[in-house]
Image (cartoon, grey):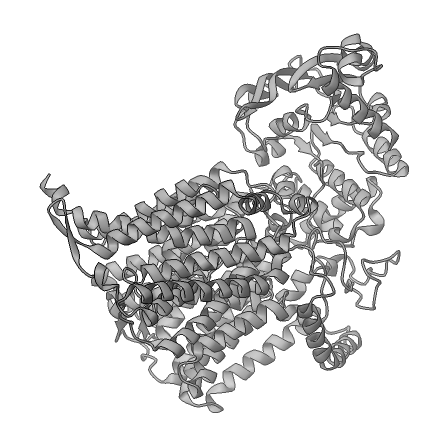
């Protein structure tokens, strides 16, 4: 897809340790422009930590992050956002006392071509608002654009968070469990929005709904206890025996060394799937 | 060796002093770490113990023992009272509790003076200990040695209780996760009360035993509070040994430090505190703490909620017709530009203020002028606390910089008012640019403490730089301002007042315009969802620094006005008490309302100097009551009384969502979408309570 041969994002032996606990251990990953990638793994596998490392809210204890050939390891999160890395949050936070629209206006502020001195020129501010309204419309929140974000339902807040992430027109979108707690209708909307992303926009998705994963992504990485168990095309990875035993916990008879722990992980996934 | 020998006595004094601070600070840290109460009345508890001890000690062992029992019991009871008082505020964050305890300390201080008099009270120690022993060739008071032993014993008992008993386990568990503790069948309320009672008892016991070291007097409470705050900050909250170490260090600074390098000791103390806080807040991640100030409201069953409701009902009959009238006027005069309509009430206020010199006497006029200066300080606190989300007790520092700069340059012959204002604002802004990086990284209570350190360090610096600032005597006799180069000096009360009014109006107008511009929105965004803003590419630190510097410049302007209105400045005008008043004024205003903060400042000046003038000596008491009432009855300040409350970030339980249309949309907004009253352009500045409040 991309004419350039070098990867968009490249993680080189990333490690993040909190004292004696190593949340992310020696993980390497390369994503080309337009990649559709999912991170899966049991709870506590280090998925969110890895995402935070890429977004810059957390710093690795070792390893390197490159973005478009540039070293990003010690860059502040705000700068990464301006370079084209957008993200959503596991627990979406909106600015409660501002309207949904104003939330998105603030989200595209630093990215919009009109941002220079936007606050001095009513004309430019109006154009910023128009862009934001389009973005809200895309995620189905146009009706509630003028309602304070604090008064939105959980699902709406999640969508608002997504709209804010998209408002920066990122080249890479980091999505932390975007479907958690959503109704079926909202999930459909989410699939639609993500399906409509331009081809050169990449995203990394943390998700427990396997059907959502299967529908959206081309490649998958499996993290277990901070280490990368397997990474590759979705179907191949999900059907790999190691992954099935370690993560999906195929059958109870299938006793393996890491038995009890990985099994709880598997049940957890089953739970999530049922919800 | 000679130096070591010569400093032996102060060094040993430092140990005694340090252990005393340790016992007091342990209580403070216990209350904060486990009960979550930043207890600014802790020094008052110590003072209560010290007074009781001094009163009952008659030079016999029995007297000391009786004093210890009674003093401890009194402080313990006061601790229980504090727990009852703070329990309903548990969900309102540390700021409300800090203000409440400060108010209670003002009340308690008045009561102590009432009972024991306003003088330093002499303390008699048991005769057996009223001698000195020879130690390594030095004579040393026996009582202090004995105190060291007793304090160590007290510390040992405390450690044992905390680490080896069930009650101690419950306390430690409560610090970690009080909900989990509740699930195991322990009533967290009981732990809350128990902890505050124990903290009070510790302070009381320390007061009785420590009375011969830090004696009971009017300044005792503040000294002890400040020193133990420093100890807690240096030592952290969890580790008793670390607190003990910090206490000894502070003790040494206060004795050995004063003996070796007099004049530097206070800098060392608060400087060390600021450094530790900054380093620690940098290590900790900034996530999660923002926006935790506002939580769920207390249950419907609480009496305070009932009282508050009564107050609202009382105000409602007056407010409703007014609001209706306003709305009718608003709808009928759609042709009148919105800016004019909104600007009308402030305009009326300004005209009334301008006419004041012909209505009230000179004394009242000077008070109003002072209220304007304090009002600018309060507005500056509002910007930092309410908009940037950094609760501050240190805006008095740029305020002081502005005031002293004005006085000094006026003496040097720069007497043109506008020039002074600009220079004062610039100096104060520069000051904030230097101190800002230390402040803006932290969040929540840490900010309160860092800014407190900044404020105290500034006062210390003013005390020390006698040649420039006049030290504790202050500055007086500097010339008044001129409007233009060559014009006459403003001397008349009325002229100075009008000068102050014009400057204040311009400063407030500029601030309001800034806050209502999209730049203000950016600040609200940072306060409301910092991580989201960072993730959207906003350089949050730069915004906060700019806001802090801007607010500092505003405080500097306030300081400049104060210098001229009072024609006298001293460290007491820019001290901790003023910082607490400014914070209260901001809270009275609702922390996000500029005009509210001005009203708050006026209310405080009115209470302290006007009402109290007819009731001399009771100013602190009245202010204390004002603090307490504000915290309980005005959780959202005056702005909250206008009947347009909206649950802030995260709440979502929505009071009556006022709706931009103001036509009674259901709680949280049902399915209606009647909020289209603001059309495209107007919508840019409608929509939220903060924008409303700014008016």
Q: Quadrant of the C terminus of chain B?
A: bottom right
| In this picture, residue B428 sits left or right of residue B550 | left
In the picture as drawn, the residue positioned furthest to the front comes out as B62
- At horizontal 34% and vertical 70% (from top left) the residue drawn is B56
Q: Whole-percent x and y of residue A32?
A: 70, 17
Residue B73 shows in the view: yes
Q: Whole-percent x and y of residue A18?
A: 55, 27
In the picture as drawn, the residue positioned furthest to the right comes out as A185
> Which image quadrant for residue B469?
bottom left
| In this picture, residue B355 sits left or right of residue B410 | right
Q: Is residue B436 or residue B506 the one in the foreground? A: B436
Residue A72 shows in the view: no
Q: Is residue B409 or residue B274 the one in the foreground? A: B274
Q: Quadrant of the N terminus of chain B?
A: top left
Q: Is residue B370 or residue B244 the one in the foreground? A: B244
Q: Whole-percent x and y of residue B220?
A: 34, 65
Q: Whole-percent x and y of residue A135?
A: 78, 41
In the picture as drawn, the residue positioned furthest to the top comes out as A241
| In this picture, residue B113 sits left or right of residue A188 | left
Q: Is residue B311 or residue B460 the one in the foreground? A: B311
- At horizontal 48% and vertical 36% (from top left) the residue drawn is B283
Height in image: B468 above or below B8? below
Height in image: B449 above or below B634? above
Total marks in image: 0
């Amino acid at each position: 897809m991309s004419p350039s041969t070098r990867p968009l994002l490249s993680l080189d032996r990333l490690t993040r340790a909190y004292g004696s606990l190593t949340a992310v251990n020696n993980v390497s990953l390369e994503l080309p422009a337009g990649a559709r990638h999912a991170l899966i793994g049991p709870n506590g596998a280090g998925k969110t930590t890895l995402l935070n490392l890429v977004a810059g809210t957390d710093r690795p204890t070792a390893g390197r992050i490159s973005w478009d050939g540039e070293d990003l390891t010690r860059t502040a999160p705000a700068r990464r956002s301006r370079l084209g890395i957008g993200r959503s949050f596991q627990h979406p936070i909106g600015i409660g006392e501002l309207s949904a629209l104003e939330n998105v206006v603030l989200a595209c502020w630093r990215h919009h071509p009109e941002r220079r001195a936007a606050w001095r020129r009513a004309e430019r501010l109006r154009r910023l608002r128009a862009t934001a309204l389009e973005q809200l419309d895309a995620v189905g929140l146009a009706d509630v654009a003028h309602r304070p974000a604090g008064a939105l339902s959980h699902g709406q807040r999640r969508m608002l968070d997504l709209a804010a992430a998209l408002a920066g027109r990122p080249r890479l979108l980091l999505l932390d469990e975007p479907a958690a707690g959503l109704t079926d209708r909202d999930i459909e909307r989410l699939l639609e929005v993500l399906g409509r992303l331009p081809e050169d926009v990449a995203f990394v998705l943390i998700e427990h709904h396997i059907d959502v994963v299967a529908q959206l992504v081309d490649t998958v990485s499996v993290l277990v206890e901070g280490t990368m168990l397997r990474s590759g095309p979705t179907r191949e990875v999900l059907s790999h025996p190691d992954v099935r035993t370690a993560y999906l916990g195929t059958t109870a008879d299938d006793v393996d060394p890491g038995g009890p722990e990985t099994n709880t992980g598997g049940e957890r996934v089953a739970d999530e799937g049922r919800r | 060796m000679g130096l070591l020998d010569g400093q032996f006595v102060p060094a040993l004094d430092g140990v005694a002093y340090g252990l005393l601070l340790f016992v007091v600070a342990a209580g403070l840290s216990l209350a904060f770490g486990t009960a979550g109460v930043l207890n600014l009345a802790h020094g008052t508890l110590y003072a209560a113990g010290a007074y009781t001890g001094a009163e009952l000690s008659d030079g016999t062992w029995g007297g000391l023992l009786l004093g210890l029992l009674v003093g401890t019991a009194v402080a313990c009871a006061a601790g229980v009272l504090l727990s009852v008082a703070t329990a309903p505020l548990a969900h309102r964050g540390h700021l409300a509790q800090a203000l409440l305890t400060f108010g209670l300390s003002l009340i308690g201080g008045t009561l102590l003076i009432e009972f024991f008099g306003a003088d330093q009270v002499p303390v008699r120690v048991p005769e057996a200990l009223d001698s000195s022993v020879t130690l390594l060739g030095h004579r040393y008071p026996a009582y202090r040695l004995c105190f060291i032993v007793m304090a160590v014993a007290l510390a040992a008992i405390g450690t044992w209780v905390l680490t080896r008993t069930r009650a101690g386990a419950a306390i430690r568990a409560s610090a970690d996760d009080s909900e989990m503790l509740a699930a195991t069948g322990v009533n967290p309320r009981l732990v809350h009360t128990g902890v505050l009672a124990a903290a009070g008892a510790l302070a009381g016991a320390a007061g009785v035993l420590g009375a011969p070291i830090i004696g009971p007097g009017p300044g005792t409470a503040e000294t002890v509070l400040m020193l133990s705050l420093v100890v807690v900050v240096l030592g952290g909250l969890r580790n008793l040994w670390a607190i003990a170490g910090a206490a000894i260090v502070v003790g040494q600074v206060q004795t050995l430090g004063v003996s070796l390098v007099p004049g530097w000791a206070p800098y060392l103390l608060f400087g060390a505190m600021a450094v530790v806080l900054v380093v620690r807040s940098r290590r900790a991640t900034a996530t999660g703490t923002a926006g935790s100030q506002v939580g769920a409201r207390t249950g419907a069953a609480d009496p305070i909620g009932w009282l508050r409701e009564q107050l609202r009902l009382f105000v409602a009959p007056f407010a409703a017709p007014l609001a209706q009238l306003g709305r009718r006027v608003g709808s009928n005069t759609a042709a009148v530009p919105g800016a004019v309509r909104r600007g009308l009430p402030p305009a009326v206020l300004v005209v009334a203020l301008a006419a004041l010199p012909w209505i009230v006497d000179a004394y009242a006029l000077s008070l109003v002028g002072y209220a304007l200066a304090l009002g600018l300080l309060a507005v500056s606190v509002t910007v930092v606390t309410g908009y940037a989300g950094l609760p501050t007790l240190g805006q008095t520092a740029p305020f002081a910089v502005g005031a002293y700069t004005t006085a000094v340059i006026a003496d040097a012959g720069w007497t043109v008012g506008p020039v002074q204002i600009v220079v004062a604002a610039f100096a104060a802004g520069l000051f904030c640019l230097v101190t800002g990086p230390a402040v803006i990284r932290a969040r929540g209570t840490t900010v309160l403490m860092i800014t407190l350190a900044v404020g105290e360090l500034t006062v210390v610096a003013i005390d020390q730089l006698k040649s420039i600032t006049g030290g504790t005597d202050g500055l007086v006799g500097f010339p008044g301002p001129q409007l233009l180069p060559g014009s006459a000096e403003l001397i008349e009360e009325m002229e100075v007042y009008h000068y102050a009014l014009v400057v204040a109006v311009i400063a407030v107008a500029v601030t309001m315009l800034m806050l209502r511009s999209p730049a203000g929105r950016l600040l609200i965004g940072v306060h409301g969802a910092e991580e989201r803003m960072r993730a959207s590419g906003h350089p949050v630190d730069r915004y906060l620094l700019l806001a802090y510097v801007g607010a500092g410049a505003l405080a500097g302007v306030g300081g400049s006005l104060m210098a001229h209105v009072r024609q006298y400045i001293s460290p007491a005008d820019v001290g901790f008490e003023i910082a607490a008043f400014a914070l209260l004024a901001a809270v009275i205003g609702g922390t996000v309302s500029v005009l509210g903060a001005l009203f708050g400042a006026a209310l405080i000046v009115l209470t302290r100097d006007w009402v109290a003038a007819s009731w001399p000596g009771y100013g602190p008491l009245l202010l204390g009551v004002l603090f307490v009432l504000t915290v309980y009855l005005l959780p959202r300040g005056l702005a909250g009384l206008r009947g347009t409350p909206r649950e802030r970030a995260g709440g979502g339980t929505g009071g009556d969502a006022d709706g931009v249309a103001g036509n009674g949309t259901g709680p949280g907004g049902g399915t209606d979408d009647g909020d289209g009253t603001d059309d495209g352009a107007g919508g840019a500045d409608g929509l939220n309570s903060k924008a409303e409040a700014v008016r």
